[in-house]
Amino acid sequence: MIIDHLDNVAQYFELNPHFEKACAFLRRDDLAQLEPGNYDIDGDNAWAIVSASVPKARADGELEAHRHYLDVHYTVSGVECVGWRATGACTIPISEYDAEEDAILFADEPLLWVNIPHGHLALLLPSDAHAPVREGSVRKVILKIATA
């Protein structure tokens, strides 16, 4: 997991061929006004999910991991908190891997919690099981970016 400010995102463009195009979505002037929902960026290579979320306690968070997509969680307003544990260290699956959703859920406890305030992002690789939660209302964008 990488935590950084949006102003520094260019240093990560080399990590993935779709990363730069996907992150350009986060620079939209109307980002804070977009309706919740899915937004196409580059077909199956990259898309955005705009979310306006209500509070969710740490106790209600479940770790999720992906195999074919990496996530970028960008906080537009509020403060999101992300629990983290290495996917390879997760031993209590709640579900089988769902290929259509590219997700598996785990009941393991996160090893650490990190706040992602306004203007910051968390880059989550397939090796990063994560549990996003929030104490208050949070508006965020999740970028889904193909790993290959």
Image (cartoon, rainbow, N blue to C red):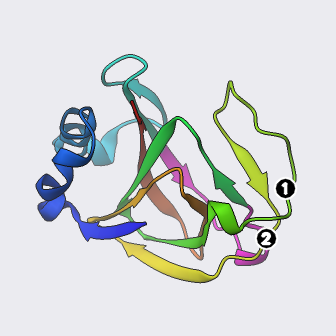
Q: Amino acid at mark 2?
A: Asp
State the SS at label 2: loop
State the SS at label 1: loop
**In the image, residue 52 lies in the stretch drawn in magenta:** yes
Image check: 142 left or right of 90? left
Q: Is residue 134 above or below residue 28?
A: below
Task: Give the CA distance from mark 2 to mark 1.
Answer: 8 Å
Q: Farthest bottom residue? A: 112
Which residue does the image show at 25% across and 47% down from the upper left? 15
Dot 2 alpha-carbon crowd within 10 angstroms: few under 14, some 14 to 19, many 20 or more: some
Dividing the picture into quadrants, the one containing residue 87 is: bottom right
Image check: 140 left or right of 86? left
Which residue does the image show at 64% across and 67% down from the upper left? 55
Q: Farthest top residue? A: 43
Q: Earlier in the sequence, mark 2 or mark 1?
A: 1
Kindly identify which residue carries mark 2: 108
Front one among 79 and 6: 6
Front one among 78 and 82: 82
Which residue does the image show at 69% across and 69% down from the upper left? 89
* Image quadrant occupied by the N terminus: bottom left
**In the image, residue 39 lies in the stretch drawn in magenta:** no
How many marks overall?
A: 2
Kindly identify which residue carries mark 1: 93
Q: Is residue 138 above or below residue 31?
A: below
Magenta part of the chain: 51-62
Q: Farthest front residue? A: 88
Estimate the x, y position of residue 47 in percent, counting from the top left: 39, 29
Which residue does the image show at 53% across and 50% down from the upper left? 126
Estimate the x, y position of residue 59 in percent, counting from the top left: 78, 76
Q: Amino acid at mark 1?
A: Pro
* Number of the label disc, if any, that sits on residue 40: none
Estimate the x, y position of residue 146 in percent, counting from the top left: 42, 32
